[in-house]
């Protein structure tokens, strides 16, 4: 049985296809007092753009090699190794994240859409986020074919 609070999230989910759309959302959704968690930052290019618009950002990636490269290229920014599915580790950063940027373009296969939906719901529930921007062609395609039923 579903928990009533499970479906009362106030988080806005924004699906973007490709890096151009993903980054184009930043001026619209990111404000100077925001504390942002970026999942899947790779070498930190988008993290740097987010940092220019927000109060604080932590760029994360599952790959230690990517994080090492990001730290070399952008030593003035905060990067951490993180498996996006390890929400407990994200909580361990001790930051009041109010927005999350997820570059999940590496997710592929038949479960990709389910993984993206699970992650967005998990982060929205745990952090009470205002906005989650997701770079996922699978999610954007799915969402463009959905309509919420209302009587």
Image: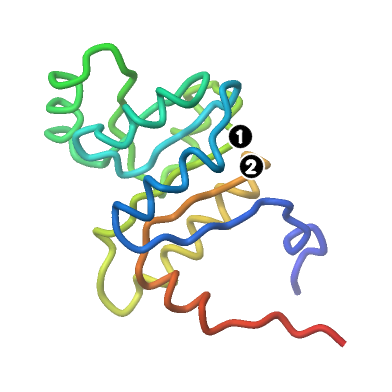
Closest to the observer, 9 or 17:
17
Question: Quadrant of the rendered structure where residue 111 is?
Answer: bottom left
Badge count: 2
**SS for dot 2:** loop
The image quadrant where one finds the C terminus is: bottom right
Instruction: Tell me, yes or no, whether the two marked residues, 1 and 2, touch with CB atoms within 8 Å.
Output: yes
Label drawn at residue 98: 1
| Residue appearing at x 37%, y 45% in the figure | 23
Secondary structure under the numbered disc 1 in the rendered image: loop
Q: Which mark is residue 129?
A: 2
Q: Which class describes the residues within 10 Å of circle 2: few (<14), some (14-19), or many (20+)?
A: many
In the figure, residue 71 lies in which quadrant?
Answer: top left
Residue 59 placed where, x, y %?
A: 34, 31
Q: Quadrant of residue 148?
A: bottom right
What residue is shown at x 33% (from left), y 36% (from top)?
Answer: 82
Picture residue at 59% right of the left edge, 46% below the top: 131
């Amino acid at each position: 049985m579903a928990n009533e609070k499970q479906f009362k999230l106030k988080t806005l989910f924004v699906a973007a296809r490709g890096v151009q759309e993903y980054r184009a959302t930043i001026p619209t959704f990111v404000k100077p007092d925001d504390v942002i968690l970026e999942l899947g930052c790779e070498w930190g290019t988008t993290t740097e753009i987010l940092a220019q618009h927000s109060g604080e950002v932590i760029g994360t990636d599952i790959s230690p090699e990517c994080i090492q490269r990001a730290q070399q290229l952008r030593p003035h920014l905060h990067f951490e190794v993180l498996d996006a599915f390890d929400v407990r580790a994200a909580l361990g950063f001790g930051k009041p994240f109010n927005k999350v940027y997820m570059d999940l373009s590496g997710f592929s296969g038949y479960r990709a859409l389910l993984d993206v939906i699970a992650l967005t719901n998990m982060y929205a529930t745990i952090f009470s986020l205002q906005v989650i921007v997701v770079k996922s062609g699978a999610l954007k395609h799915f969402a463009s074919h959905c309509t919420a039923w209302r009587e």
